Amino acid sequence: MEQPHLPGVGGPVIAPVSTTFQPTAMMGITLPDIVLASTDNVLFYVHRTRLIAVSANGFNHLIPFYLPLKVDDRAPSILVSERAEVLNIVLHTIYDISSTQFLPSFETVSEATNVLARYGVDLKLHAGPSQSLHSLISSFAPYRPIDTFALAASHNLEDVAVASSAHLLAYRLSTLTDELAERMGSIYLKRLVFLHLGRIEALKALLLTPPHRHQVVPDCNEEVQPALMRAWALASAHLLWDARPNLSTHLLQATLLFFEKDIKCELCKACLHERITVLMREWAAVKVCTRWSG
């Protein structure tokens, strides 16, 4: 493939070339037949048929659907409005090639996702659980959970939103900005709020069931056994006073066992331990992400 002829330039242009999208980068048995030039003059050799196939608007009307693109038998080149690091992610997504090795910032990935939508790419088809864009966006969830969730929500990327929501249990909803709330939209905002509220309500419901009472024995009769119920009530009140959706099973167990010191009966202690074991298992099973059950 010859050196591309950039619009408005009289002769060949010597410019950096993408390490992935080079003149010899074949798709099947087809060599690249078009060049995209970024605003910082990096060249990306790609396949016109690939871009047209994934775009609903001719790559934002930059590429004709049917007309051949030839300029003096050179590789036709199109100037785009994105810098190279953004265009690089856009094209990796279109070709479903991982771009995590470039370590792009969240801002760059967010911009590239918006650009893909502008270029008419169906993001839902390119952000499934097994695809590169899903992995790339989701990689920010542990560090930028609310931003990742808002980005996924703004494009209705269900799987990415679900993956990132599991990292939002510690997020304080009171700190949510109007900008983030507007970006994620009412549906995903509601789901996030309901995730938090749902876990708190589930915890309340679980704590309502106290340990069962054992049979009356000489050292622990019906007058003594209420000590176990009082200890459970105190522990439950302590937990619910400042309960958070991200309450760990370890803290749950430690708090409930702390009040064991007020119980003298060994059988009552055994009932307490049994209830705590079941409670931890039930709490671990409570939903930790925003996916609807139905």
Image (spheres, helix red, strand yellow):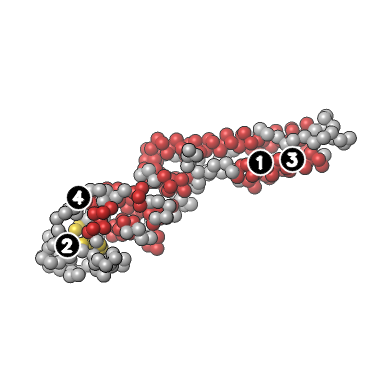
Q: Would you name the residue on which mark 4 appears?
A: 61
Q: Is mark 1 in CB contact (under 8 Å) with mark 4?
A: no
**Picture coordinates of residue 46, whole percent (x, y):** 25, 62
Tell me which numbered mark, 3 or 1, is placed earlier along the sequence: 3
| Up/down of 221 relative to 58, above or below | above
Q: Are circles 4 and 3 on residues that touch, CB within 8 Å?
A: no
Which quadrant holds residue 244? top right
**2 or 3: tag closer to the N-terminus:** 2
Position of residue 129 relative to residue 103, above or below, is above
User: Which secondary structure, mark 3?
Assistant: helix
Q: Position of residue 152 (x, y in %)?
A: 39, 46
Q: What is the number of the mark on residue 279?
A: 1
Q: Earlier in the sequence, mark 4 or mark 3?
A: 4
Q: Is residue 252 visible?
A: no
Disc 4 packing (10 Å; few <14; some 14–19; many ≥20): few
The amino acid marked with disc number 4 is: His
Q: CA distance from mark 1 to mark 4?
A: 58 Å
Q: Residue at x 38, y 54 (%)?
A: 133
Tell me whether the residue at label 2 lies in contact with that at label 4, contact meaning CB atoms closer than 8 angstroms: no
Q: Amino acid at mark 1?
A: Leu
Question: Mark 3 sits on what residue?
Answer: 272
Q: Earlier in the sequence, mark 1 or mark 4?
A: 4
Q: Position of residue 57 (x, y in %)?
A: 23, 48
- State yes or no: discs 1 and 2 in contact (Cβ < 8 Å): no
Q: Which numbered tag is attached to residue 200?
A: none
Q: Which residue is mark 2?
A: 76
* SS class, disc 4: helix
Give me the C-alpha separation between circle 3 and circle 1: 10 Å
Q: Amino acid at mark 3?
A: Leu
Q: Name the N-terminal-most of marks 1 and 2.
A: 2
Vertical side of 124 occupied by 4: above or below: below
Q: Residues within 10 Å of mark 2 (few under 14, many from 20)?
A: many
